[in-house]
Amino acid sequence: MISSLRDPRCSISSAPPISTILSTNPKPSYITICLPSPPDTRTMEVERVQAISSLAFGLDTIPPEFVRLEEEQPGMTTFHGPVPEIPVADLGGGKGEGAMEAVVKAAEEWGIFQVVNHGIPAKAVKELQRVGREFFELPQAEKEKYAMKEGKIEGYGTKLQKEVKGKKAWVDFLFHNVWPPASIDLAVWPENPPEYRKVNEEYTQHLLIVAENLMKWLSEGLGLEGHALRMALGGDELEYLLKINYYPPCPRPDLALGVVAHTDLSAITILVPNEVPGLQVFRDGCWFDVKYIPNALIIHIGDQIEILSNGRYKSVLHRTTVSKEKTRMSWPVFIAPPPEKIIGPLSELLNDKNPANFKSKKFKDYQYCKINKLPQ
Ligand SMILES: O=C(O)CCC(=O)C(=O)O
Ligand SMILES: [Fe+2]
């Protein structure tokens, strides 16, 4: 699919040919990080993008594995004409009067929208951003204490395995569950800054309300009871996984990508961005920048709601670009069913004229196929 993403309407930048970059680029520096104890055996070779970014400061090149294929490069594929804006829904201070219609329409037509007046206090969001930023600004060895262990999805890291064609993404991240309490492993929650835990707990309490309202309106939009989607997704067992994306400055933002093109495998994703633009959405054959709206949250419809709604709500294809001078950060929370939950089109939506467009399968099996790029 990715190879068809180039559109003649998308502008072509004056980027030098890849061969020039490949031949002039110095080998990336490997950062050797010595974990504190025991010092003799635990020396680990890790390439964190944050460290590569510091070494690349002032240069005009990036290591070749970060140079995307031409058909993916933002400099080649970003549309620069009049850009359609993704829908914005006003949630009326969290009460949501009149919001249902806007949310349903946006989920049907776009699969992505921003919400303003959502009821989460601006201070709770600012604090979430502050503690996340302060974590990434800690010395490397401190961050490595939380390094993702093999086979785990929580922890601090950089995508270690290369993608198809050996390409890498310009981003480091931290993942940890924030809800339900039984899923939380505090060992992967940073101890520094000291307020990290309290701030994340407070943000999560506010987020639960927004998430439940969205699921309610989306259920009603399908002509179902308000609790239908939430229950079909596992009810109180729904898992909320926070990711912090840290995209450090990149000397060649025209050639690199932060997160590559994908749809979220969650049911729904609620994302706080910082003020540095970078999120792009694929629509009508082009990649468009999503406008930054102060204090807005960005909502992505993920694969599981697309499946439950039998395709009425769209899971949106998106990616992120990076900035030459600034650090972009984002805080998506992926809301997803528990692993054993079977997800398929809701039976209430199916009849002779509307057969199921998707298979029913356990969420963990869906996840396995998606991560390993196997057919669903
Ligand atoms: O940083 C962003 O705005 C989007 C990140 C994203 O799509 C992801 O982590 O799945
Ligand atoms: Fe995403």
Image (tube, grey):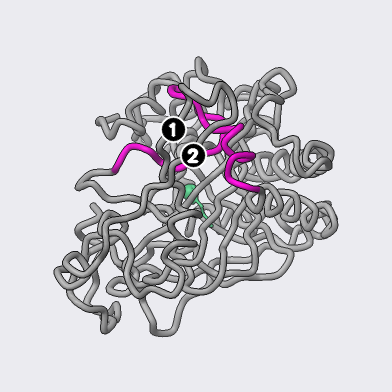
Q: Nearer the viewer, residue 140 or 81?
A: 140
Q: Which mark is residue 364?
A: none
Question: Which residue sits furthest top?
Answer: 340
Residue 359 vs residue 201: left or right? Answer: left
Q: Nearer the viewer, residue 311 or 361?
A: 361
Q: Are circles 1 and 2 on residues that touch, CB within 8 Å?
A: yes
Q: Which residues are magenta?
A: 139-162
Q: Amino acid at mark 2?
A: Ile
- Residue at the location (58% across, 66% down)? 87
Residue 365, position in %: x, y?
Answer: 39, 21
Residue 31 sits above or below residue 13 on the image: above
**Residue 271 visible in the picture:** yes
Residue 90, image quadrant: bottom right
Query: Mark 1 Cα within 10 Å, few/some/many (few <14, many 20+)?
Result: few
Residue 138 vs residue 206: left or right? Answer: left
Residue 167, position in %: x, y?
Answer: 27, 50
Main secondary-structure element of the magenta-colored stretch: loop
The residue singled out by tag 1 in the image is: 44
- Residue at the location (27% across, 54% down)? 65
- At mark 1, the secondary structure is strand
Q: Nearer the viewer, residue 112 or 129?
A: 129
Residue 328 vs residue 5: left or right? Answer: right
Q: Earlier in the sequence, mark 1 or mark 2?
A: 2
Residue 347, position in %: x, y?
Answer: 48, 25
Mark-to-mark CA distance, 1 and 2: 6 Å
The residue singled out by tag 2 in the image is: 33
- Residue at the location (43% across, 56% down)? 52
Q: Is 155 included in the stretch rendered in magenta?
A: yes
